[in-house]
Image: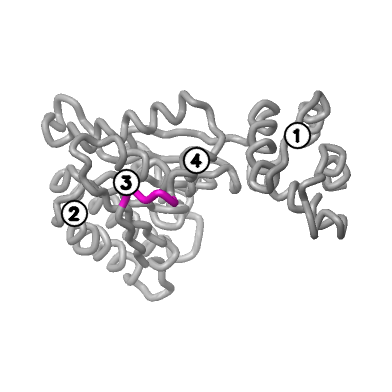
Amino acid sequence: MLDLWALPDPQWAERWDRIIVSPATKDRLLNYCLFALGWRSRVSNVGLPVHGLVVLSGPPGTGKTTLAGGLADRAARELPGGEELLFASIDPHALPSDMLGESQRGAARLFERTIPDLARRGKPTVVLLDEVEALAVSRSRASMETNPVDVHRATDAVLAGLDHVAGAYPNVLFVATSNYLPGVDAAFLSRADLVEELGLPQREAIVAILHDTVAEIGVSLAGDGLAELAGSCEGMDARQVRKLVLRAIIARRELALDPSPLTAADLRRALPG
């Protein structure tokens, strides 16, 4: 249910550097993370409420989970004092259960025991709640589904646990991701200090993603054809754009053996449809 890493880690730097989102978005995320981990314990939660929760939303394949790990690694590099940061990844799908009340007990254990145990180590700690719509289920939508009482109680336990950690452990910061924001409970979202939407990449971002991907195999693409190709890729998520390069490579045996001659024309021929 929980995986743990100590950061910074040189292998994690690309999780921040190579996810193509707007610089303004990255600045907000990093600035918030540094402020929350560095100053939250010094301010009143009434005078300046900081709940320690960031939500990254958007379609699958837009880099939310990777960016969350990159954010933690970058913050570990920039926090004063060079202190080690702990990054914990929680699998919310391990918590829900068909057994009555078990989802509620699992959420309570997570926020009352597991995360506090980490926090008491005294290190800055970033906890990733991936696909949080499986954990903090919208109670208004659950009312129309089977067993809504159990869903309500589990979400109640998440909210109570989040409030407990926020009040008792200012060294903990949650980063939640969601592929479907309407599925997340409104009370959970109201606790978020920052909600960032990572949408599908537009033409300029697609060009940057293509350049970054082909550089992995030592190829440099240039010319107006790449911008035109990027226009044909609009509507694809960032993961699909990167896999377009793989599709182009495996379309020809000679490229599979040596991808260095790859061209923009090869990428265009690999476009779906």
Give the percent coordinates (x, y) of residue 202: 67, 29
- Within-10-Å neighbours for mark 3: few <14, some 14–19, many 20+: many
User: 16 or 28: nearer the eye?
Assistant: 16
* Disc 4 versus disc 2: nearer the observer: 2
Residue type at mark 2? Ala
Membership of 8 in magenta stretch: yes
Q: Earlier in the sequence, mark 3 or mark 2?
A: 2
Q: CA distance from mark 4 to mark 2?
A: 26 Å
Q: Earlier in the sequence, mark 4 or mark 2?
A: 4
Q: Which residue is mark 2?
A: 119
Which label sits on residue 221?
1
What SS does tag 3 mark? Answer: strand
Residue type at mark 1? Leu
Relative to residue 160, is residue 37 depicted above or below? above
Q: Which residues are magenta?
A: 7-11
Q: Which residue is mark 4?
A: 57
* Disc 1 versus disc 3: nearer the observer: 1
Q: Which residue is mark 3?
A: 174
